[in-house]
């Protein structure tokens, strides 16, 4: 998959310019980051000015799906065939260097460009909505009260091909200057993770329904 | 502070259009979100197309500071006085509704618009760099090997006034449809937090330097 980006940038835009040694065009790396991140940030141009909006995404094969209300600015701008940019970032840790200048973060980030299409095909749209629900909580779609036709029609789904894409990854310890390694200053990494705490049942639960395993044991992949 | 946004949207752009009941223009809410978030997402227009880049920010009073290499596309676009959009989002939990359609997230999000200025004043620039370092790890700036003049000159700092700004907040349990509350489907919230695990000392630490308290006890505010 991602034939265009197996070994090199698919366009001059996705060529990582800054700190190019952190760049990756490896499909498995890109897929993992897209699937692990809970949300993405979508950029679009509205009246000549940039707008950034956080939203939930899901990936099916080589397509990224977004959804929303037909009234949203983001989805209205997509209707016009305009280009968007999508960024997904996972912060894996804080890199504590000896030098203030070299403090950094360990992260995995993906950037995508393209012109999304609005999904009209009902089968594809149902699959996308299922994927978006299960992207956040795997298993939830099958357990939920299904979407009605009215809800389905009232939701817009957009599809962006994952081809103009790149990843940027930093991992490992600090990179200090040679002459600073002897300084008596602690250096290392503080790993960070998104962790769930115990699920809180809705106070309006009317019957004794136990929390399903995928809620009790919830973890990001 | 944020005089312009004490009680109402400061511009038609920051007026929250979708789900307006989640909107907030309260300075304390906005400040807390900006300070708690590790990173922000900056949107700018490059050659007519939107670009979104994750970066570290810091707030001093009513100004948001960003930094980077003078070679970065983001900072080059700021040099031209062009407008940017900044989004900061904290995901507080997953809202598990009975209906697939009503699944949601609890989040706190801030959106800012404006034309940043490049900070030339040395005093302001030093303060911004200290704030950016201590935004990520409070206390680190004073403990680090200080920035050299060369490093200082090689870093660009941009300042964005926090005035065209709004917040959007969702909290609490699911909002299902009246007729769905009797369904035997679990509903509730899975709270999420960013949690550190034990700090990992750099393998190249040459002396027995203990990890400082602000590293060992690291927590987001």
Image (cartoon, coloured by chain):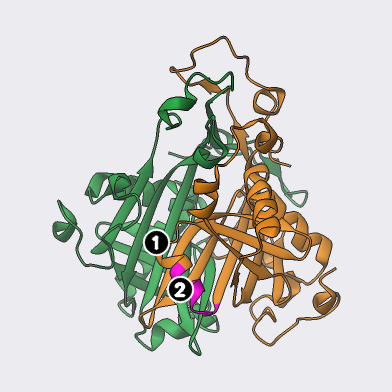
Chain colours: A green, B orange
Q: Nearer the viewer, residue B187 or B181?
A: B187
Where's residue A179, x and y in %? 45, 26
Does A138 sit left or right of B84 as displayed?
A: left
Residue behind mark 1? B71
Where's residue A186, x and y in %? 58, 22
Q: Of label 2 and label 1, which has the lower sequence position?
A: 1
- Decide: is A80 above or below A161: below
Q: Chain of mark 2?
A: B
Q: Nearer the viewer, mark 2 or mark 1?
A: 1
- Decide: is A51 above or below A101: below
Where's residue A114, x and y in %? 31, 73
Q: Secondary structure at mark 1?
A: loop
Q: Is residue B80 magenta?
A: yes
Characterize the local packing of mark 2: few (<14), some (14-19) or many (20 or more) Cα atoms within 10 angstroms: some
Q: Which residues are magenta?
A: B76-83
The residue under the point 26% across, 60% down is: A15
Does B125 sit left or right of A112 as displayed?
A: right
Q: Quadrant of residue B108?
A: bottom right
Q: Is residue A105 magenta?
A: no
Q: Which mark is residue B77?
A: 2
Q: Nearer the viewer, residue A179 or B34?
A: A179
Q: Nearer the viewer, residue B169 or B174?
A: B169
Where's residue A115, x and y in %? 32, 78
**Residue A171 in view (yes/no):** yes
**Residue A127 in view (yes/no):** no
């Amino acid at each position: 998959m991602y034939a265009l980006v197996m070994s090199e940038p698919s366009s001059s835009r996705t060529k990582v310019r800054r700190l190019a040694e952190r760049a990756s065009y490896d499909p498995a790396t890109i897929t993992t980051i897209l699937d692990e991140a809970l949300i993405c940030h979508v950029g679009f141009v509205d009246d000549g000015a940039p707008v950034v909006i956080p939203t939930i995404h899901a990936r099916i094969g080589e397509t990224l799906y977004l959804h929303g209300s037909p009234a949203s600015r983001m989805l209205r701008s997509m209707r016009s065939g305009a280009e968007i940019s999508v960024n997904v970032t996972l912060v894996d840790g804080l890199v504590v260097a000896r030098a203030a200048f070299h403090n950094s973060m360990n992260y995995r980030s993906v950037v995508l460009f393209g012109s999304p299409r609005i999904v009209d095909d009902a089968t594809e749209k149902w699959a996308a909505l299922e994927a978006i629900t299960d992207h956040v909580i795997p298993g939830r779609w099958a357990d939920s009260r299904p979407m009605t036709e009215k809800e389905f029609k009232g939701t817009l789904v957009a599809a962006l091909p994952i081809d103009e894409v790149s990843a940027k990854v930093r991992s490992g310890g600090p990179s200090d200057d040679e002459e600073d390694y002897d300084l008596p200053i602690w250096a290392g990494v503080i790993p960070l993770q998104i962790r769930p705490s115990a699920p809180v049942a809705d106070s309006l639960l009317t019957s004794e329904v136990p929390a399903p395993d995928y809620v009790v044991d919830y973890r990001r992949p």
